[in-house]
Image (spheres, helix red, strand yellow):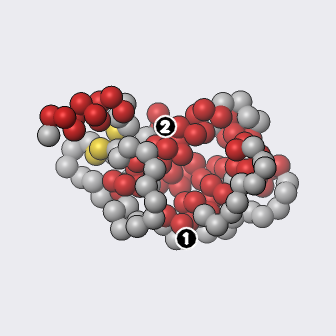
């Protein structure tokens, strides 16, 4: 995404939402049209919300999402990291044209459609437990 974390904690690095918005735009340019650069709490929370909406647009299931306070107030950083990994899996399925680094386990599609979701409100991807994926690979 072009930013160095340095000595900051992961929570401090991601808190403004700028890194997350830039991540989504690196995957699908222009998905988030404007990224707030201001160091103002409500603008930072707005960036986080934009990231979450973009993740939904990319097909990330609600079960893999986090709430803005989970990151901004550091209430549940585990859910934030889980969401980022799940997004990596969704990108591998929904955006095969993305040639950047891969993160996480590919999500599988419900039914036959593995293209971008038709509806912004309904997800078509399932998140699988890593043990389930290993088991499925053994069967193949």
Give the camera-side residue of 58 and 8: 8
- Is any atom of residue 56 visible in this view? no
As drawn, the residue found furthest toward the right would be: 40
Residue 120, percent across and down? 44, 52
Give the camera-side residue of 55 and 135: 135
Q: In terms of sequence position, does the residue under pointer 2 or pointer 1 come before the other?
A: 1
Q: Residue at x 43, y 41 (%)?
A: 61
Determine whether the residue tagged by mark 2 lies in a helix, strand or loop: helix
State yes or no: discs 2 and 1 in contact (Cβ < 8 Å). Answer: no
Determine whether the residue tagged by mark 1 lies in a helix, strand or loop: loop
Residue 8, percent across and down? 78, 48
What count of labels does the image hold? 2
- Is any atom of residue 110 visible in this view? yes
Q: Residue at x 61, y 69 (%)?
A: 33
Q: Residue at x 34, y 62 (%)?
A: 96
Residue 138 is left or right of residue 104, and the answer is left
**Location of the N terminus (image quadrant):** bottom right
- The numbered mark at residue 135 is none
Marks 2 and 1, how far apart in space?
23 Å
Q: Residue at x 22, y 38 (%)?
A: 137
Residue with the mark numbered 1: 30
Mark 2 neighbour class, 10 Å CA radius: few under 14, some 14 to 19, many 20 or more: some
As drawn, the residue found furthest toward the left would be: 140
Mark 1 neighbour class, 10 Å CA radius: few under 14, some 14 to 19, many 20 or more: few
**Location of the C terminus (image quadrant):** top left
Residue 109, percent across and down? 28, 45
Residue 103, percent across and down? 46, 50
Residue with the mark numbered 2: 64
124 in relation to 97, above or below: above
């Amino acid at each position: 995404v072009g930013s160095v974390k340095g000595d900051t904690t992961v929570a401090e690095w991601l808190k403004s939402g700028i890194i997350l918005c830039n991540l989504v735009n690196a995957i699908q340019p222009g998905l988030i049209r404007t990224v707030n650069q201001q160091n103002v709490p409500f603008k930072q929370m707005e960036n986080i919300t934009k990231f979450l909406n973009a993740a939904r647009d990319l097909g990330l299931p609600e079960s893999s999402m986090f709430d803005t306070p989970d990151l901004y107030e550091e209430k549940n950083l585990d859910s934030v990291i889980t969401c980022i990994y799940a997004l990596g899996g969704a990108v591998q399925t929904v955006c095969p044209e993305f040639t950047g680094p891969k993160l996480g386990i590919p999500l599988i599609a419900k039914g036959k459609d593995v293209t971008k979701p038709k509806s912004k409100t309904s997800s078509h991807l399932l998140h699988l437990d890593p043990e389930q994926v290993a088991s499925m690979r053994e069967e193949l």
